[in-house]
Image (spheres, rainbow, N blue to C red):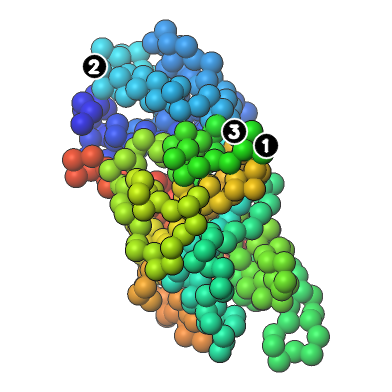
């Protein structure tokens, strides 16, 4: 258990000194000057300025993205985190560091790192089963490969945006099963996917594989992802090569990257697997990377669901092993996301297509309106927390976005 922070307002916060997520921020007085910030309570500590003020080496923190820190590797990540913890718990730093705290409400938050490659998985058995039932009625809901490997696809890193960025309703080819031919126009079935994202720091060599035991050496931290999805475009285009324009228009990311170290108390055993995995994916003898992260999905302020990440069939360590099983190298800034987090109960589903069963069971909102899919002006916010040390909670902040026509 770490000592208490001298920032009284941060005590008991899910952003206490046990968390210390990293982001990139600017302030209205210097809008073009992006700096690395560390969230403590409802403040943002200017991390580079703090390093300078304390006489510590500041090169990794004096940057406008997290990339130099991401590239530095696990031993330096631990050193920087220990220094931040020390500064924020030792009363003697209060005078020097208090002027370097910006109230969160006055900080503009930016995409915290340059996203290299982006991979999205499909690792909730409940989500994959529900989508199989909806997209392939009458067939086995899970494809024959599903329990042998974490299924994924390469997404579009250039359209990953930070929380708060508006999402423009995409156009594309739409064809309902009853239509003879497709037409072109704005999607009628705009959806969300509540996911957890993993940020790669340490790169790997081309031709080498990263085993599951290498997960904490390569992965820096965790964030929240909304994989916006146009279901009508997706349903028509995905055969036989998978997701393309129905997904690539926007992917939103929460602005705070929670360090992996902060999630030590959130580790749980993943669910029992009923198919024996091949050795490179077999985590039964090691220390598997299930994580007890509780998500919440809100539409225009109304809670739609609470998806439980702990129930994901494939862990992020297995996903990393799969991503590199062919020798594909990792780059600093690679992002991989879990796939939609859906639990077994209806109100634990992480996408509207499941919550409304492909639009056939619309959701009623408190204002009396109903939704099958998103309407222009709708705002979706995903938040999450996880267990921290000694009964505390770890906050992830939020990923939100509003739909514009
Ligand atoms: Ca997805």
- Which element carries disc 1, helix, strand or loop? loop
Q: Which residue is mark 3?
A: 203
In depth, the one of 249 and 313 nearer the eye is: 313
The residue located at (32%, 19%) in the rendering is 87
Q: CA distance from mark 3 to mark 1?
A: 9 Å
User: Which quarter of the rendered picture does the N terminus lie within?
Assistant: top left
Position of residue 316 measured from the top left corner of the image (x, y, whole percent): 47, 50
Is 65 placed left or right of 267 in the picture?
right
- Would you place residue 221 above or below residue 124 in this image? above
Q: Which residue is mark 1?
A: 206
Q: How many marks?
A: 3
Mark 1, mark 2: which one is toward the viewer?
1
Mark 1, residues whose alpha carbon is within 10 Å: few (<14), some, or many (≥20)?
A: few
Circle 3/circle 1 CB separation < 8 Å: no
In depth, the one of 345 and 87 nearer the eye is: 345
- Which element carries disc 3, helix, strand or loop? loop
Mark 2, mark 3: which one is toward the viewer?
3
Q: Which residue is mark 2?
A: 91
Mark 3, mark 1: which one is toward the viewer?
1
Position of residue 100 measured from the top left corner of the image (x, y, whole percent): 41, 21
Q: CA distance from mark 1 to mark 2?
A: 47 Å
Q: CA distance from mark 2 to mark 3?
A: 37 Å
- The answer to whether any part of residue 65 appears in the image is no
User: Which quarter of the rendered picture does the C terminus lie within?
Assistant: bottom right
In depth, the one of 44 and 149 nearer the eye is: 149
Mark 3, residues whose alpha carbon is within 10 Å: few (<14), some, or many (≥20)?
A: many
The residue located at (50%, 50%) in the rendering is 280
- Would you place residue 361 above or below residue 104 in this image? below
| Label whose residue precedes the other's in the sequence (1 or 2) | 2
């Amino acid at each position: 258990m770490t000592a208490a922070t001298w920032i009284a307002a941060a005590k008991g916060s899910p952003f206490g000194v046990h968390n210390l997520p990293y982001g990139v921020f600017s302030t209205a007085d210097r809008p073009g000057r992006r700096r690395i910030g560390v969230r403590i309570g409802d403040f943002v500590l200017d991390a580079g300025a703090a390093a300078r003020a304390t006489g510590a080496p500041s090169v990794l923190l004096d940057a406008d993205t997290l990339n130099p820190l991401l590239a530095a590797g696990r031993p330096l990540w631990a050193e920087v985190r220990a220094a931040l913890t020390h500064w924020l718990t030792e009363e003697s730093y209060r005078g020097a560091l208090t002027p370097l705290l910006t109230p969160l409400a006055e900080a503009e938050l930016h995409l915290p790192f340059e996203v290299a490659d982006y991979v999205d998985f499909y690792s909730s058995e409940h989500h994959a089963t529900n989508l199989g039932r909806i997209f392939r009625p009458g067939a086995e809901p899970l494809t024959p490969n599903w329990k042998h490997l974490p299924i994924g696809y390469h997404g579009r890193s250039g359209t990953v945006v930070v929380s708060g960025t508006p999402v423009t309703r995409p156009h594309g080819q739409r064809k309902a099963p009853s239509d003879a031919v497709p037409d072109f126009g704005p999607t009628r079935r705009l959806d969300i996917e509540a996911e957890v994202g993993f940020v790669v720091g340490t790169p790997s060599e081309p031709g080498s594989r990263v085993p599951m035991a290498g997960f904490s050496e390569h992965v820096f931290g965790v964030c929240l992802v909304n994989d916006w999805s146009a279901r009508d475009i997706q349903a028509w285009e995905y055969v036989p090569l998978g997701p393309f324009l129905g997904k690539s228009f926007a992917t939103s990311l929460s602005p705070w990257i929670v360090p992996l170290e902060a999630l030590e108390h959130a580790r749980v055993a993943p669910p029992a697997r009923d198919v024996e995995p091949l050795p490179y994916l077999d985590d039964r003898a090691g220390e598997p990377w299930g994580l007890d992260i509780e998500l919440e999905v809100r539409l225009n302020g109304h809670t739609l669901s609470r998806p439980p990440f702990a129930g994901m069939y494939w862990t992020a360590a297995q996903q990393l092993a799969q991503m590199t099983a062919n020798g594909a190298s990792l780059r600093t800034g690679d992002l991989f996301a879990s796939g939609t987090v859906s639990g077994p109960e209806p109100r634990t589903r992480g996408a509207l297509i499941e919550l409304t069963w492909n639009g056939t069971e619309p959701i009623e909102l408190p204002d009396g309106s109903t939704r099958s899919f998103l309407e222009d002006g709708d705002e979706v916010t995903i938040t999450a927390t996880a267990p921290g040390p000694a009964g505390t909670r770890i906050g992830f902040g939020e990923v939100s976005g509003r739909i514009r026509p």
